[in-house]
Image (tube, rainbow, N blue to C red):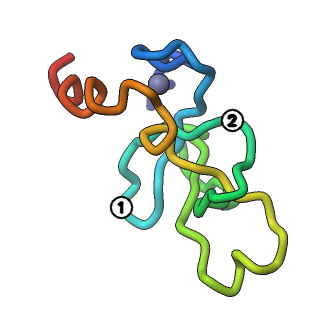
Amino acid sequence: MSIIQLSPTCRSCMAPIVWVRIQPSHKWTCIDPEPRLRGNLLYEPSTAKDGSALVRVATPLERTTGVALYQSHFASCPHADLWRKAQGAT
Ligand SMILES: [Zn+2]
């Protein structure tokens, strides 16, 4: 078991971000730390052994209930194109 250390800021625009694993695929992604009006992700109680935060896509019903919804940083990053190119090239 290892704790994965990842930068808490975007490599492209230096904005603060939060690394989470999106359910159900458990793929790593990064989100903006603050809830967004147009967000579509909500936190799940984490059951991951490494303590990583989990999110999942909110259902249409949940989106109407006023819960805090978060948005992928890829959606707001001004350098998202660079990000996509850089993915996997580390
Ligand atoms: Zn960014």
**Label at residue 25:** 1
Q: Nearer the viewer, residue 42 or 82?
A: 82
Question: Which quadrant of the view contains residue 64?
Answer: bottom right
The crowding category of the residue bearing disc 1, from other C-alpha atoms within 10 Å (few below 14, some 14 to 19, many at least 20), is few
Question: Percent from the top left, x then y, of residue 79?
Answer: 37, 25
Residue sitting at x 70%, y 75%: 63
Q: Nearer the viewer, residue 4 or 60?
A: 60
Instruction: Answer yes or no: disc 2 within 8 Å of ligand 1.
Output: no
Residue located at (58% from left, 56% from top): 55
Q: Is residue 55 above or below residue 90?
A: below
Taking the view exactly as shown, the residue that stands out farthest to the right is 66
Mark 1 residue element: loop
Quarter placement of the C terminus: top left
The amino acid type of the residue labelled 1 equals Ser
Q: Position of residue 88 (x, y in %)?
A: 18, 28
Asked if residue 1 is positioned above or below residue 16 in the image, the reply reads below
In what quadrant of the picture does the N terminus appear?
top left
Q: Which residue appears farthest toward the front when viewing the image?
A: 78
Label 2 secondary element: loop
In the rendered view, does 11 fall on the left or right side of 43? left
The residue tagged 2 is: 33
**Label 1 vs 2, first from the N-terminus:** 1
Residue in view at x 69 percent, y 86 percent? 61
**Mark 1 → mark 2, Cα distance in angstroms:** 21 Å
Quarter residue 59 falls in: bottom right
